[in-house]
Amino acid sequence: MRRCVGRKWRKSRLFIFMSALAFFCLVIRYAKVCENICLSTTEPSAPQTNRQRLTEQHGINCSDIYDMDPVALGKSLSLRRRAVPVLDDEDIANATSDCGLYLASKGYRSVHTSAAEQEFPLAYSLVVHKDAAMVERILRAIYVPQNIYCIHYDLKSSPHFIAAMKGLAHCLPNVFISSRLERVQYASITRLLADLNCLSDLMESPVKWKYAINLCGQDFPLRSNAELVEELKALKGASMLESVRPSELKKQRYSYRYELKNAQSQYHQIPVKTDQAKPPPPHNIQMFVGSAYFTLSREFVSFVQSSPLVKDFLSWSEDTYSPDEHFWATLIRFPGIPSEVLPSHPDISDMLSKTRLVKWQYMEGSLYPSCTGIHVRSVCIYGAAELRWLLNEGHWFANKLDPRVDPVLVECLEEKLEERQRGMSTAH
Ligand SMILES: *[C@@H]1O[C@H](CO)[C@@H](O)[C@H](O)[C@H]1NC(C)=O
Ligand SMILES: *[C@@H]1O[C@H](CO)[C@@H](O)[C@H](O)[C@H]1NC(C)=O
C-alpha cells in the first residue's frame, strides 16, 4: 500500500505541490542561466517518441551508464535538471486509438521468446490509477505474447487514464481490464480486492499460466521474461512472498477496528482507528506481516479461491488497516496451502524475498548503497547511477521508478532488458 499510494493524502498533496513548485522554480532558474551562459550548447528537449529516445538525443550510452562512466552519469544528471516532457494520459489514449500504428511503433511485433518461455506463461495483475505513459512502459517491458495481463484501474481514475487503459487492452489480445473494478481507497481492503478481482479473472483465462505477479504503476522489471522464467522454474512450485513476525506497532493494524473516513473529499477516504478491539483472527490463524506484492504459484491462487478458511480470513480483514500487507504474508504460512512455509520458519524479509526491491532511506548505507534519485516518504525513487546495482542485486522487480525523477534510468533499463531478452530467447 504505502509504496504506490500516498501514505497521507493531505501531506502528500502538499508535498507534491511544494515539490512541483520547487522544481518549477529550479527549471525557470536553470532556463534563465542557460539563456545567458550556454544557449549555444543546449538543444531543446523534443517530445519523446520511441524512435527519438532521450538517451540517443543527448548522446548518452546506456552501457556507459551501466559501467558507471562519470561523463555519461554527468550527462544524465544535467538531463534531470531539465523539464523533460512526458506524455500525458490523453496522448496514450490517442496513440492506442490506431492499434496497427501503435503496435508497430512500439516494437511489440518484434518480441522474441524461446520455447522454454512459451511453455511457462506468466500472469500479471496491474493495479494502477494514474500516469498512463508509465503504465504503458511497464506493460511493454514485461510484454510477451504468451503471457496474460489484467489491468485494474481505479474507479476514481480520470476519463483519459481510463481511455488509455482501455486502449491498451483493445490493442493487445492478451491484455484485459478486470471484470470487477474497485474504488481503491488507500490502505483499505479495496486495494487487496483489486488484486483478488484480477486473480479470479486470470484463473478463468484459457492461458494456463504458472505464476501470478502483481505490479503497481511505479514498479519496473529487473529481469527479462526469459530470465524471470528461468528463476521461477528454479522455485519448483514455491511462491515468493515477504512474511515476517509483526512488531507491536504492526499488531495495532488488526487488533482494532478501522473505519473509512473522508480525508479531503468523499473521493479520498482513509481507514481510521477506532477504540473497538477486534476479535482474534478466525481458525486460530497466526498473523504475519509483509508486502502487498507477490509472486504466487497457480496452485496457491487456486487454494486462495476455494478455501473457506481464506474466505473467513478475508472477511475478518475487511476492517483492518492495510490488509494487503498481512493477507499474503499470513496465507503463505497457512496450514495446507501449496508449498506452505511453516510458522516456525524464520522471517522472510523484503531482502530475502525477490519479489520487490525497495530502498528505504533509513537502511541506506547498511543494507544497500545510497539513493541516487530522490526520496518520497522515505522510499527511494531510483536514479541512473543505480542501474548496475538494480540489475545485479538479485530482485525481480524494483519500486519506485519515475521518468520525471530520472528519465535516463527508465530508458536504460528498457534497453538492457531488451538486450537480455534478445540474447536469451535466441540462445535457446
Ligand atoms: C555504447 O557503448 C558500447 C560499449 O562501450 C558500444 O559497444 C555500443 O556500440 C555503444 N552504443 C552506441 C549506441 O553508441
Ligand atoms: C487526441 O485526438 C483528438 C481527436 O483525434 C484531438 O482532438 C486531440 O487534440 C488529441 N489529443 C492529444 C493530446 O493529442
Image (cartoon, helix red, strand yellow):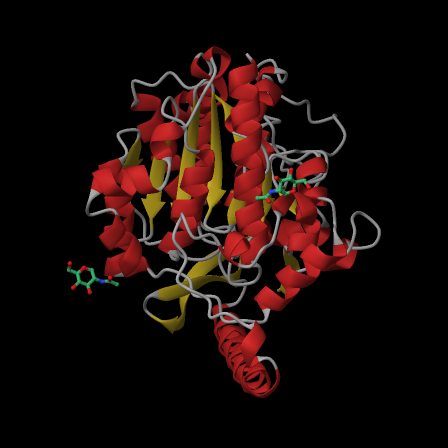
Image position, residue 308 (x, y; %): 42, 25
Q: Quadrant of residue 280?
A: top right
On screen, 256 above or below 268? above
Q: Quadrant of ligand 2?
A: bottom left
Q: Quadrant of the C terminus?
A: top right
Residue drawn at point x = 65 percent, y = 54 percent:
384
Nearest to the observer: residue 52 or residue 252 = 52
Nearest to the observer: residue 120 or residue 314 = 120
Residue drawn at point x = 41 percent, y = 66 percent:
261
* Tally of marks: 0
Q: Is residue 321 visible?
A: no
Residue drawn at point x = 64 percent, y = 36 percent:
242
Image position, residue 42 (x, y; %): 55, 72
Nearest to the observer: residue 24 or residue 83 = 83
Looking at this view, name the residue that lies furthest to the front.
Answer: 40
Relative horizontal placement of residue 406, taking residue 246 as reference (left or right): left
Q: Quadrant of residue 416?
A: top right
Image position, residue 61 (x, y; %): 62, 48
Residue drawn at point x = 36 percent, y = 25 percent:
145
Nearest to the observer: residue 363 or residue 266 = 363
Image position, residue 32 (x, y; %): 55, 87
Q: Quadrant of residue 104?
A: top left
On screen, 159 above or below 347? below
Q: Is residue 169 visible?
A: yes
